């Protein structure tokens, strides 16, 4: 199974800050990775697919990069509505596996 | 608009069974590979299993914790996905989501408790 190690597990940031979240795969997954945002009590929402493609309707302050084993989600200027938990998901091979999540909190 | 609506959750005793349904609309369901993902209270997301489209073989894959106990099936004529859960354990307590991986339902809560 492919393990997805996500870091940090939590972070505190202010509105306007640049935020970076990382996922590392235990083996190469090409660019078969998505990033999701989840708010309390709600279903996850996909932000990024294929490692760097922005989902339709998602603000351009979100971006993804990486390939192989190292991936990054960047929020260029954190907005109040971005405080949430973020997950990566590899879909290169079964079982699909999620990172452990990063909770982005208000500083 | 893509819609995925889960139903069938509830309270069940350990060792019991439950069947979840997911009604899909707004896309060509028969062409979609569909997954179930769960989230235990206060925990992260866990992939449960997947069924491919019939044109891609219609095969299923499962996560180790549920293999042999859970079965995913689909009814393309009614645009519905199913999750049959048998021999339920307390650790199966979670919100269960139906997903194409891009689109998600709102989830249905399954509680396994005596």
Image (cartoon, coloured by chain):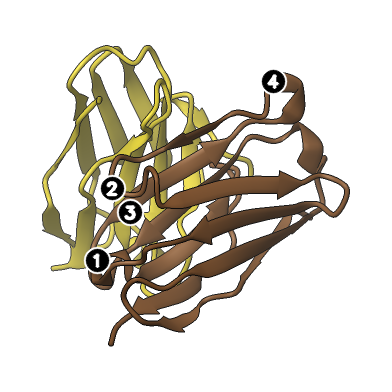
A33 versus B38 height, above or below: above
Task: Please name the color used to draw chain B.
Answer: brown
Q: Secondary structure at mark 3?
A: strand
Mark 2 secondary-structure assignment: loop
Indicate the chain on which mark 3 is placed.
B
Q: Residue A78: percent from the left, percent from the top?
A: 31, 55
SS for tag 4?
helix
Residue bearing the label numbered 1: B91
- Rendering coords of residue A47 (x, y %): 48, 44
Any part of residue B4 in sight: no
* Quadrant housing residue B87: bottom left
Tell me the distance, in whole angstroms, between the alpha carbons under discs 1 and 2: 10 Å
Chain for colour yellow: A
Residue topped by disc 2 = B65
Dot 1: chain letter: B
Indicate the position of residue A39 as horizontal and vertical percent values: 38, 67
| B8 displayed left or right of B32 | left
Q: CA distance from mark 4 to mark 3?
A: 26 Å
* Location of mark 4 (residue): B56
Question: How many angstroms separate mark 3 from mark 1 (CA)?
Answer: 14 Å
Sequence-first disc among 1 and 4? 4
Task: Please state the chain letter of the residue tagged with numbered disc 2 in the rendered image.
Answer: B
The tag earlier along the polypeptide, 1 or 2, is: 2
């Amino acid at each position: 199974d492919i393990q997805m190690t996500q870091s940090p597990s939590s972070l505190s940031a202010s509105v306007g800050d640049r935020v970076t979240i990382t996922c590392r795969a235990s083996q190469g997954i090409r660019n078969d990775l998505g990033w999701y945002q989840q708010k309390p009590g709600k279903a996850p929402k996909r932000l990024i697919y294929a490692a760097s493609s922005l989902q339709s309707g998602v603000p351009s302050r979100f971006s993804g990069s990486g390939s192989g084993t190292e991936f990054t989600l960047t929020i260029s200027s954190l907005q109040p509505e971005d405080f949430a938990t973020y997950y990566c998901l590899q879909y290169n091979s079964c079982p699909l596996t999620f990172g452990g999540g990063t909770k982005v909190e208000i500083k | 608009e893509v819609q995925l609506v889960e139903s069938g959750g509830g309270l069940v005793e350990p060792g019991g069974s439950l069947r979840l349904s997911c009604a899909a609309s707004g896309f060509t369901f028969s062409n979609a590979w569909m997954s179930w993902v769960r989230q235990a209270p206060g925990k992260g997301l866990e992939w449960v299993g997947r069924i491919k489209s019939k044109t891609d073989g219609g095969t299923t894959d499962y996560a180790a914790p549920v293999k042999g106990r859970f079965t995913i099936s689909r009814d393309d004529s009614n645009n519905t996905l199913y999750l049959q859960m048998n021999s339920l354990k307390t650790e199966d307590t979670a919100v269960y989501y139906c997903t194409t991986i891009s689109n998600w339902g709102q989830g249905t809560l399954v509680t396994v408790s005596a």
